[in-house]
Amino acid sequence: MDIILLGPPGAGKGTQAQRLQAKRGMIQLSTGDMLREAVAKGSPVGLKAKAVMEAGKLVNDAIVSALIGERLDSAAAHGAIFDGFPRTGHQAEALEILLGERGRKIDYVIELAVDEEALVDRITGRFTCANCGAPYHDTFHVPKAAGTCDICGEHEFKRRPDDNEATVRERMAEYRAKTAPILPIYEAKGLVRRVDGMASVDAVAKAIDDILDSPAA
Ligand SMILES: [Zn+2]
């Protein structure tokens, strides 16, 4: 079972990928991590990538594909979770070839979907007690007595500067731009499954399990 896992910041992709590795023995292939590892090991592809990066250039599709080819076989037993790859139609084709050579294919593209408005509400409403750090939320968890911390009784609160609407919307826009080139490719093949990323960690985990345990697409 080889899958692509997609999700914007705040959707819990890292948590779910870790769980799939621990529970199912799948191997997460994150291109950033693989690149660093190959360079550190000095593998043939790593040496090539290192030369390109030292010349101040971006590592191209051919190198990324070779890197994934190197690692695919190590993820043969229980499958791979692709994270951050493919990002372009070209890369999606390259991946199909790499997998096809091994009698494999992408079985599912699982997107942890978030509702942008709900995500904005969830993140921008957060604040904490400046004294004891107790967490609160404008909508979901206000102090019992307005302006007074339930835990320590102090009256000062603070908010993280990046918990603002503009930052959340910027991250969502980046995510959409990154997935826009590849989602339609996999939609056309009927492989995309959406899971509610706003649900609890356990509920998301169960939804993913149900997809992976269902008969192949
Ligand atoms: Zn407090």
Image (spheres, rainbow, N blue to C red):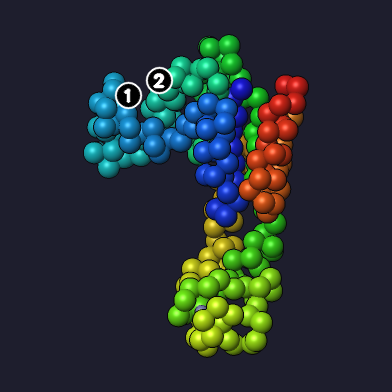
**Numbered disc 2: secondary structure:** helix
Q: Amino acid at mark 2?
A: Glu
Q: In front: 116, or 48? A: 116
Q: Amino acid at mark 1?
A: Val
**Percent x, y of residue 189:** 72, 27
Q: Is residue 190 left or right of residue 126?
A: right
- Mark pair 1, 2: CA separation: 8 Å
Q: Is residue 204 left or right of residue 80?
A: right
The answer to whether 206 is drawn above or below residue 8 in the figure is above
Q: Which residue is mark 2?
A: 70
**Percent x, y of residue 217:** 74, 23
Q: In front: 36, or 145? A: 145
The answer to whether 161 is drawn above or below residue 78 in the figure is below
Q: Which residue is mark 1?
A: 45
User: Who's the residue at 69% across and 74% down the image?
Assistant: 139
Q: In front: 217, or 175? A: 217
Q: Quadrant of residue 120?
A: bottom right
The answer to whether 39 is drawn above or below residue 101 in the figure is below
**Numbered disc 1: secondary structure:** helix
**Percent x, y of residue 158:** 49, 79
